[in-house]
Image: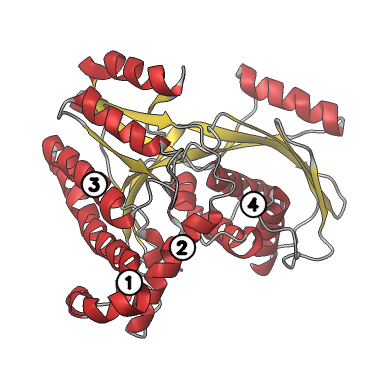
Amino acid sequence: MDQRIQALLRKYHSLFGGGEARVWSAPGRTEIGGNHTDHQHGRVLAASVDMDMLAAAAANGENTVRVKSEGYDMITLTLDSLAPVPGEEGTTTALVRGICAEAAARGFAVGGFNACVTSNVLQGSGLSSSAAFEVLMGAVVNGLFCGSSLTATDLAIMGQKAENVYFGKPCGLMDQMASAWGGIIAIDFADPAAPRVTPVDFDFASAGHSLCMINLKSDHADLTEEYAAIPGELGAVAAHFGKKVLREVDEDAFYAAIPALRRETGDRAVLRAIHIYNDNRRVGQIVEALRSGDFARFLALVRESGRSSWVYLQNVTVCGSTRDEAAAIALALCEKALGGRGAYRIHGGGFGGTVQAFVPDELLESFRAQIEAVFGEGSCCVMHIRPVGFTEIALK
């Protein structure tokens, strides 16, 4: 048993006393293709990474859930009511309540439990610590009360609903799917109730490149409104055609309607829709490039996606900000450090969290030094793809 798990179990027993606890893991994720396409029922390419959250947990025979995450106060909630609680939005308690509610809605008798959580997924890093937490809590509930019968897709959908309905953030499903499934997966959300998942086998190290995440150390806590504006504006475009999401709107019809859309929805919404159409199409091209071993084409497509996110989707900088443009600075530094090689793009939800870069191995140390000279030691993290998603760890 490794030292991290041993320390977690010691912490669990110091908080909750004796008894046998089980341990689960859920990884962070990286988005490789398809920026903000998931909430428009589009396509994405995503993967789990080798940073994870761990939970030691056991049923307590009560009607109360207690969760202590490292570095945070313990949260406590009763299971008397699993309906959303006004004023609880934006809290960890809301996420845990939502996960329990979703399991109960599937017919399982969810009881109280105690859990102790530790994480090396960098918060605010764009590796989606929130999705990893949701999947982790789902794995705990699944193991303790559902006979481990829930699938990876089940846990992902439970996590998304907890975040949408209980936490109050209108996220798509990509983050949770990548964390729950593991490995590199292409996902088609044409039917979000039953996403179509196709594993993609590729090793970036075999192409002589390292996958780097530049952690800009920005806090996403106050950016829910900025994030929500994207699906809100895209929804307004779709509504012009009597639809809910852009996947249901013919692209030629959209372009023909741009004069009317500019008046109805504003220009930013139109530009964001252009990004969605293009990036959704790009996902299939990225998958094909990886499958055929055309890594140069893959890098070119990643660069195209990054430019589209910056120019059309406009999720690099918070609207109106002039003093804090960390992501834009990081992108400019990547351009200089890579000198036309590799690829770089805003990552995930955007608005300052993380920049992703595929860096030729021979440039890695120089690249890291240039990035960390600006954003601090440890800000450039080399990631590796984790082949498994949520899992219970066998204790020996």
Q: Return the residue at label 4.
A: 142
Whether tag 3 and tag 2 are in contact, CB under 8 A, the answer is no
Under mark 1, the amino acid is: Leu
Mark toward the start of the polypeptide (4 vs 2): 4
Tell me the crowding category of disc 4: few under 14, some 14 to 19, or many 20 or more residues within 10 angstroms, Cα based. many
Q: Nearer the viewer, residue 308 or 147?
A: 308
In primary-sequence order, the first of circles 1 and 2 is: 2
Q: Kindly report which numbered mark, 1 or 2, lies closer to the viewer in this rendering.
A: 2
The amino acid pointed to by label 2 is Ala
Quarter occupied by the N terminus: top right
Q: Which mark is residue 229?
A: 2
Quarter of the image holding residue 355? Answer: top left
Amino acid at circle 3: Arg
Answer yes or no: is residue 191 visible: no
Count neighbours of disc 3 (C-alpha within 10 A) and say few if under 14, some if 14 to 19, many if 20 or more.
some
346 lies above or below 270: above
Vertical arrangement, residue 9 with respect to residue 370, above or below: below
Q: Quadrant of residue 63?
A: bottom right
Q: Which sits in the foreground, 11 or 245? A: 245
Q: Is residue 109 visible?
A: yes
**Is 106 placed left or right of 233 in the picture?**
right
User: In the drawing, does residue 164 fall left or right of residue 116?
Assistant: left
First in sequence, mark 4 or 3: give its number. 4
State yes or no: discs 1 and 2 in contact (Cβ < 8 Å): no
Q: Is residue 48 above or below residue 108?
A: above
Q: Which residue is mark 3?
A: 307
| Residue at screen point 64% across, 58% down | 167
Quadrant position of residue 335: top left
- Dot 1 corresponds to which residue? 246
